[in-house]
Image (spheres, grey):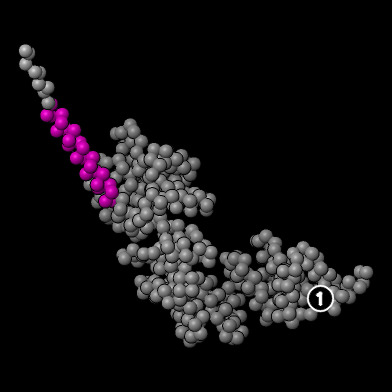
Amino acid sequence: MCPKFKRRINYPILIIVFLIFVNCESEKAELNKIDNYLIENYSIDKDYLYKKYNENSKSLSISGILIYFLADSVNKDYFCKEIDKLKNQNVLDDAYLLVAESRLVFLSGNKERARQLLERAIEKDSSNHWALFELSNQSEIESEKINSLEKAIQLKSNFYRAKVYNAFLLDVTQHPKKIKELLMPLNENNDDVRIYNLLAEANYYLNEFDEAKRNYEISNSLKSNVDALIGLGTIYFNQEDNMKAKEFLVEAYKLDSSNISVLSSLGWFFFNMNKMDSAEYYLNRVTAQAAKLDEIELTDLVDFYLQIGDLEIAQSLVDTLKARFMLNYIIEGYDLIVNYLVQGGEERAIFLDLYKNKYGDEAMNWLTSKLDRLQIDITPKIKAVQSQSS
C-alpha cells in the first residue's frame, strides 16, 4: 500500500488571512464606534473627529465618514486632496467616501455632481444611513427631505441627528406629537437651546403646559434667548398671570429690542390688556418689517389697524397681502372692508353680492362678523343698490 499523502498546510498564508480578518473586524468595530458616536449626538467634537481621522487614515469607510463631518471646516481643500489620494489607492467605490465627496462637491456649488455621487453611494449600499441623511440636506423638495430622514431613522432607530433634522422640518402646529416622539428622549449632553424650544412648543400645542414651561426654562438656563422668554411669557399669559408674562416679554425685549417676534408679542400683549397706545407703538414697529411676516400675521395686523381706525396702514398691509399671497376670502374680504371705509358710497356695497357668489355663505358669515365688530352697517346701502339695479 502506498502511504497516505499528507496535505501540506501553508501556515504563513493562514496567518496572513487571519491577520487580515482580525484587521477587518477591528476596523469594523472602530467604524461602528465612530458611527454610534455621530448618530447618537447632535453636537460633535471636531477635535475628536480629527484625532480619529489621523488614527484611521488608511480606512476608506472611516476616513469617508470623518471627512463628511469635517467637510464644513476650513480644511475643505485639504480634504478634497485626501479623497483624491484615497480614491487613487483603491479601485472599488466606498459608499462612505462617496458621501463625503458628495458633501465637499455640494459645498463647492456643484449640486448636480453632488447628487450623482450620492446616488452612486446609495446604489453601492442602500442601507447607508449617512447617504440618506445627506440626500435630505441637499434636496430642495421638502417631501424628499422628510422621506429621506424617515428612511435613515428606520435604518438606525437611535439616529438622533436625523430625528432632530426631521423634527425641524415639520410644522409644529400640525405635528406636535410626531415632533415630541422624534426629540424624546433628549440626549443628556444636549445643550442646543433650539431643540428644547421646539420640544416646548410641541408640548404647548399638546396642552402640556407644565412640560412646555420646564423645557423653555431649561433652554433659557443654557443660554438666555428670546424664543424661550416669549414662550414663557405666552404660557404665563394664558394662565392669567399677566405680571409674570410681562416680566418675561420685557426681558426678551431687553435681550433683542429689534426682534420682530418680541415686538409682536409685546404688541399683542398690550392689545389684550386694552393698552392701545403701547400696542400701537410695538405693532407699528412690526409693520415696518411687513416683508418678514406671513399671511396670518399680516391679516391680524390689518384687523388691528381697522379697529383703531388707521385706514392708511390697513390699506398698505392689504396691498402687501394681495401682492404676496394667492387671493382668498380673507384677503378679498379685508380689501372690500378697507376700500368701503376709504371710498364709501353705494358703489362699493354691490361687491358684497359678488363676494358672496364667489366664496359662499361661510365666507359671508366671516365678513359679516368682521363688519359687526367694526360697527359697520352697510345693509341699507346694499338694499339701495339692489333696488336701483332692479
- Asked if residue 157 lies left or right of residue 296, the reply is left
Residue occupying the point 49% across, 58% down: 169
- Asked if residue 387 lies left or right of residue 14, the reply is right
- Residue 387 placed where, x, y %? 91, 73
Q: Is residue 226 visible?
A: no
Q: Which residue in the structure is indicated by mark 1? A: 344
Magenta span dominant secondary structure: helix
Residue occupying the point 11% across, 29% down: 11
Tell me if residue 20 is in the magenta stretch: yes
- Asked if residue 86 lies left or right of residue 293, the reply is left
- Residue 275 placed where, x, y %? 59, 86
Residue occupying the point 30% across, 53% down: 36
Q: Quadrant of the N terminus?
A: top left
- Residue 194 placed where, x, y %? 42, 66
Q: Quadrant of the C terminus?
A: bottom right
Q: Residue furthest front?
A: 1
Residue 282, placed above or below residue 60: below
Residue 74, placed above or below residue 318: above
Q: Is residue 303 visible?
A: yes
The residue nearer to you, when weighing 352 against 150, is: 150
SS for callout 1 = loop
- Asked if residue 331 lies left or right of residue 385, the reply is left
Residue 232, placed above or below residue 104: below
- Residue neighbourhood size for the residue with mark 1, other residues' Cα within 10 Å, grouped as few (<14), some (14–19), many (≥20): few
Read off the magenta span: 10-34
The quadrant where residue 15 appears: top left
Residue occupying the point 66% across, 65% down: 321
Tell me if residue 52 is in the magenta stretch: no
- Residue 339 placed where, x, y %? 76, 71
Q: Which amino acid type is shown beneath numbered disc 1? A: Gly
The residue nearer to you, when weighing 303 against 149, is: 149
